[in-house]
Image (tube, helix red, strand yellow):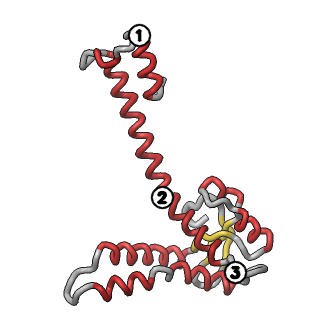
Amino acid sequence: MARSLSKVQKHISKKKGGKINSLHENSRDARRLRAAGAREDKLHRIMDATLKSNQIYVDRIAWFRSALEGSVGAVSDEEMHVLTQGFIDREDEQLEEAKSQRRPGRPPSKIEDQIKQRKEAEEREFRGGFWVPEFRSAEGRSKLERWTGDWSGLNTLDFVRVVKAGSIKASSFPPKGLS
């Protein structure tokens, strides 16, 4: 039965009379402590990786929410395509600035490479179907405006896939493949 590190430490300290540091290197209790510590580390690494991968989508939804702040009413399909292309092109100024700061003949900087890779990935996704919140209806737009800004709140929103060729298909949460 897997236990958390704090429970294992508590159990061993009760057993040893509060002296957890007086364990033999290869004793059962020391092995239990190491295993519990390794489990905690593994869980933290997995959780951090999950949060980092989800943050991309949270930032995307937040950008669309801020892009709609000044307007009122439903958004047409054409405006949805324009907003999606605007999201993909959001870092063009930074890319141009990084290119202009680079001396001729020098390789691109890390920032320049990261922006290019992110833009290429988003362009590929746009060709197949770019995952965005549904804000063409008044109900979808109000849901987006009420969104609190975190990953767990995204399950209340409706999503669509905006294809560069012109179609818009319904999608699901969380994003996976071309759902």
Give the number of the mark in front: 1 or 2: 1
Q: CA distance from mark 3 to mark 1?
A: 64 Å
Earlier-in-chain disc, 1 versus 2: 1
- Local packing at callout 3 (Cα closer than 10 Å; few below 14, some 14-19, many 20+) is few
Residue linked to disc 1: 15
- Tell me where residue 85 sits by quadrant: bottom right
Query: At x 63% / y 74%, what residue is drawn?
Result: 66
The x and y percentages for residue 37 are: 37, 31
- Local packing at callout 2 (Cα closer than 10 Å; few below 14, some 14-19, many 20+) is few
Residue linked to disc 3: 70
The x and y percentages for residue 27 are: 29, 15
The x and y percentages for residue 62 are: 60, 68
- Is label 1 in contact with label 2 (beta carbons under 8 Å)? no
Q: CA distance from mark 1 to mark 2?
A: 42 Å
Query: At x 40% / y 15%, what residue is drawn?
Result: 13
The x and y percentages for residue 6 are: 45, 26
Vertical placement of residue 54 versus 9, above or below: below
Earlier-in-chain disc, 2 versus 3: 2
Image mark count: 3
Residue linked to disc 2: 53
Query: At x 50% / y 82%, what residue is drawn?
Result: 89
User: Quadrant of the image for the C terminus?
Assistant: bottom right
Left or right relative to 91: residue 169: right
Earlier-in-chain disc, 3 versus 1: 1
Q: CA distance from mark 2 to mark 3?
A: 29 Å
